């Protein structure tokens, strides 16, 4: 498994994206976001997405240079059409708009339709928490990307419908949870296929509804499907997925599954941020959060050699390690990036 300096990979990804049709500014913003996912151990939202984003650009699912169109706005809300702009460009602009509202508002919410893929959902609430604002982000795929079967069902009926939430902690730390409502993200299955790996048990099924570990099952015809997250056959996870579809499509103006014929793939989203100063205060939030986290970490583990691990611990550890020692990529992914570079005429630096 080759290992590369993080900055080297970021620059390489930016060159590929720019050569494929994104502006230089867009390419750098997207590459920076993808590298953050890669160093955090979320390869499903890392460099594997470069080819996908270029394909989206060719198909018109993402449009270079698109800007937010805002048909309705109040002092504490925004409804916008991203007009298929790149997600990593739309999201920072949206956060800035919401931060300005939070100067005078306790709670602000944005509902956005027709956005290019926003990448790792947790990145955006992480940014908000770093600015001192807890946040919740819900995303659906406009009824188009159908990969997840309902409990007891053979056929996929909805997308992975991810959500993320973050709370600011003392000393610039963040509590962050980022998850799909399927047992595994579709991107992780794609990455396993590209890397020649198997998928963990209980995550996918073949077209007949039989459990399988073979990622190829999702790419055959007829295709298999992802399973919903959670125990008891995934009823709780699927209920959460349905809530996300219903709320996000209903508020943003986007669609629930099944999308009408000819509908373009897009992310629709609802993002809510809170300003603690209008409630019990940021200091109180941080003190209570730290007390709670310290108590959890101090609780007795079932195995002494494996301390309690909280959401975000693995990503934080990998981020520090990979920024210092380099980022490993599977040989399958690296060869795919090399082939893409050759097709675009991009020189690969040693």
Image (cartoon, rainbow, N blue to C red):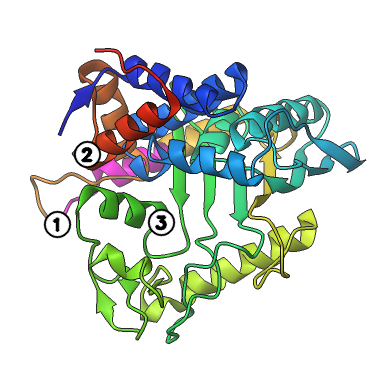
Quick one: label 3 or label 1, which is nearer the N terminus?
3
Residue 122 place in picture, x, y as percent? 50, 41
**Pointer 1 residue:** 302
Residue 153 place in picture, x, y as percent? 45, 85
Image position of 31 (left or right of 257): left
**Pointer 3 residue:** 185
181, 173: nearer the viewer: 181
**Contact, CB < 8 Å: mark 3 with mark 1?**
no
Q: Tell me where the magenta segment starts and ends, as one range.
A: 291-302
Disc 2 element: loop
* Number of other residues with Cα within 10 Å of mark 3, as a class: few under 14, some 14 to 19, many 20 or more: many
291, 339: nearer the viewer: 339
> Where is the C terminus found, in terms of image quarters?
top left
**Contact, CB < 8 Å: mark 2 with mark 1?**
no
User: Is 169 drawn above or below residue 179 in the view shown?
Assistant: above
* Number of other residues with Cα within 10 Å of mark 2, as a class: few under 14, some 14 to 19, many 20 or more: some
- Number of marks drawn: 3
Alpha carbon separation for disc pair 3 and 1: 28 Å
Alpha carbon separation for disc pair 2 and 1: 33 Å
Q: Nearer the viewer, mark 2 or mark 3?
A: 2
Disc 3 element: loop
Do we see residue 316 in this rendering?
no
Image position of 14 (left or right of 301): right
* Number of other residues with Cα within 10 Å of mark 1, as a class: few under 14, some 14 to 19, many 20 or more: few
Quick one: label 2 or label 3, which is nearer the N terminus?
3
| Residue under the image location 52 percent in, 39 percent down | 53
State the image quarter where residue 254 is shown: bottom right
Residue 26 place in picture, x, y as percent? 60, 24
């Amino acid at each position: 498994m080759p290992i590369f300096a993080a900055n080297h990979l970021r620059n390489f990804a930016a060159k590929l994206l720019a050569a494929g049709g994104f502006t230089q500014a867009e390419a750098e913003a997207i590459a920076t976001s993808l590298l953050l996912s890669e160093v955090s151990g979320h390869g499903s939202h890392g460099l594997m997405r470069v080819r996908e984003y270029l394909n989206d650009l060719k198909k018109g699912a993402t449009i270079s240079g698109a800007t937010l169109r805002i048909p309705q706005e109040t002092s504490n809300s925004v409804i916008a059409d991203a007009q298929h702009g790149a997600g990593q460009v739309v999201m920072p602009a949206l956060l800035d708009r919401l931060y300005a509202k939070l100067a005078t508002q306790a709670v602000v919410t944005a509902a956005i339709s027709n956005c290019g893929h926003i990448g790792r959902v947790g990145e955006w609430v992480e940014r908000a928490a770093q600015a001192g604002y807890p946040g919740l982000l819900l995303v659906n795929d406009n009824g188009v990307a159908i990969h997840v079967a309902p409990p007891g069902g053979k056929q996929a009926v909805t997308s992975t419908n991810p959500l993320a939430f973050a709370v600011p902690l003392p000393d610039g730390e963040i509590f962050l949870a980022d998850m799909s409502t399927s047992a595994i993200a579709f991107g992780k299955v794609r990455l396993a296929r590209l890397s020649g790996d198997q998928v963990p048990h209980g995550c996918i099924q073949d077209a007949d509804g039989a459990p399988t570990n073979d990622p190829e099952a999702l790419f055959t015809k007829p295709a298999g499907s992802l399973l919903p997250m959670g125990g008891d056959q995934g009823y709780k996870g699927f209920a959460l997925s349905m809530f996300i579809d219903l709320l996000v499509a209903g508020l943003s103006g986007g669609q629930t599954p099944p999308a009408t014929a000819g509908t373009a793939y897009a992310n629709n989203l609802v993002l809510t941020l809170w300003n603690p100063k209008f409630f019990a205060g940021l200091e109180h939030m941080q003190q209570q959060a730290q007390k709670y986290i310290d108590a959890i970490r101090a609780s007795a583990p079932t195995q002494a050699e494996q301390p309690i691990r909280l959401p975000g611990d693995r990503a934080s550890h990998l981020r520090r390690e990979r920024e210092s020692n380099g980022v490993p990529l599977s040989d399958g992914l690296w060869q795919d990036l090399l082939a893409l570079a050759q097709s675009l005429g991009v020189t690969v630096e040693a």
